[in-house]
Amino acid sequence: MHSTSGSRRSFLKAAAGVAGAAALAEGSTAAAAEAADGVLMAYVGTFSSPLSDVLPTQVDLPPGNGRGIHLFEVDEDTGALRPAGIQEMGTSPSRLAINTAGTRLYSANETDRVGPDKEGTVTAFAINRADGKLAPLNSVRSGGAGPTYVSIHPAGKHLLVANYFGGSVAVLPILQDGSLGPATDVKTDAGKIGPTRATHAPPGSFAFSGHDRTHAHQILADPSGRFVLHVDLGLDKIFVWRFDPAAGTLSPGGSPFVSLPPGDGPRHVHFHPNGKWLYSIQEEGSTLVLFDYDGDTGTLSERQTLSSLPPGYAGSNFCSEILVSGDGKFVYAGNRLHDSIGIFAVGRDGQLKHVADEWTRGNYPRSFTFTPNGDFLYCCNQRADHVSIFRVNRRTGGLKFTGHYAPVGNPSHVAFLNLPRRP
């Protein structure tokens, strides 16, 4: 396996495959047990209206080419996507989460503006188990402006929301019918904003996106559900909260936060399957950080930092997604402007080693997701208005482009669901 730091032509040839048995992405693997004889659906969240009323530091500003949530059937032999309908929405459902039963889908509506505080909303949908179609149940306020991330607590009774423009996180109760109730808790971030120059920025970088105010970018529970973590890009911090499942509330953990290097801008985190290691990706610093995680106390201890980019890279880059393969052998890191997915091998001690980089075949990869069985990776190239599809190699950790694209305006996130085989 060779790293790709030369021409675009050599870059095209880089990396083949990915190791990982069941590579499972957050909120995208519901009802995986039906995979053997079912139909695999893909739901693609998009920016379906232009971002407006935003700060001048906002760097992506999608024009809103999507139409809502785009539905596809997946050819599990080739990875190709066949259009299966669109849930029309003009509120930019940019992040999706599906419950374990595969009966409900939730969307963070990033460009919705409700009330005097211009809050975003979250919508709950019922999923028709016969054809995968969506039926809206209700929409509620998200607890802040610009909700950019939703995840379901492991107990299945609460939805967690991160509001990017509001700099807040919220807990929404999931009611018996799957609809959402008003927030049971909202926490608003506060503190000293990091510098406009990232500590670990590549040489010549002008990457500056979130160090103007607080920006909650992600929220998720740890594997046990006892603690909830959320990332604030502007504060350069990962917060750790104790979660009260009865009240649906958050309280500071014993070690309530960990700080990243000033200006690096943590964006997303993902747990290793062993629950003991947490990997963080920094948007402006273009780094990956390994933390040891103590599940008894919720404490994070930093142990390794390395670049998300190939050796010798110079200039601007904005990191996006980070995922760990289902077998825990590889970590994948999204690079926007470099337009690549960096591939890193996980050592026995959890430390990462750069393996290769794969060109995403498009512009500005906002996120990527593995299919429930780990055979394919789907990359949302936000500015290229398509999803590109890669076959994964379980042995080497690389990715091989299938030649398939799915046209979707401003795609943001893909979530998968196995349905029963139709008669």
Image: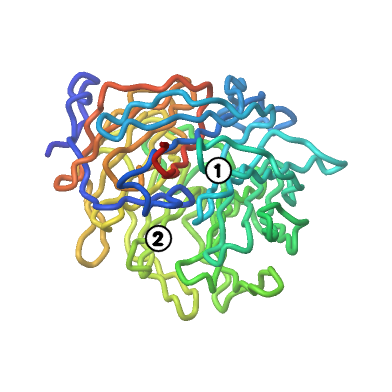
Q: Is residue 44 left or right of residue 276?
A: right
Tell which of 143 and 54 is nearer to you: 143
Asked whether the beta carbons under mark 2 and mark 1 sit within 8 Å of each other, the answer is: no
Q: Residue at 65% of width from left, 38% of height from top? A: 135
Tell which of 201 and 299 is nearer to you: 299
Cα separation between marks 2 and 1: 19 Å
Furthest residue in direction front, as rendered: 423
Identify whether 152 is placed above or below 343.
below
Q: Quadrant of the C terminus?
A: top left
Q: Quadrant of the N terminus?
A: top left
Name the residue that disc number 1 marks: 96
Q: How is the image coloured?
A: rainbow
Furthest residue in direction left, as rendered: 1
Query: Residue flagged by tag 1: what amino acid is it?
Result: Leu
Identify whether 127 is placed above or below 277.
above
Which of the labelled discs sits on residue 271, or is there none? 2
Q: Is residue 54 left or right of residue 64?
A: right
Tell me, yes or no, if residue 211 can be seen here. no
Q: Residue at 32% of width from left, 44% of height from top? A: 37
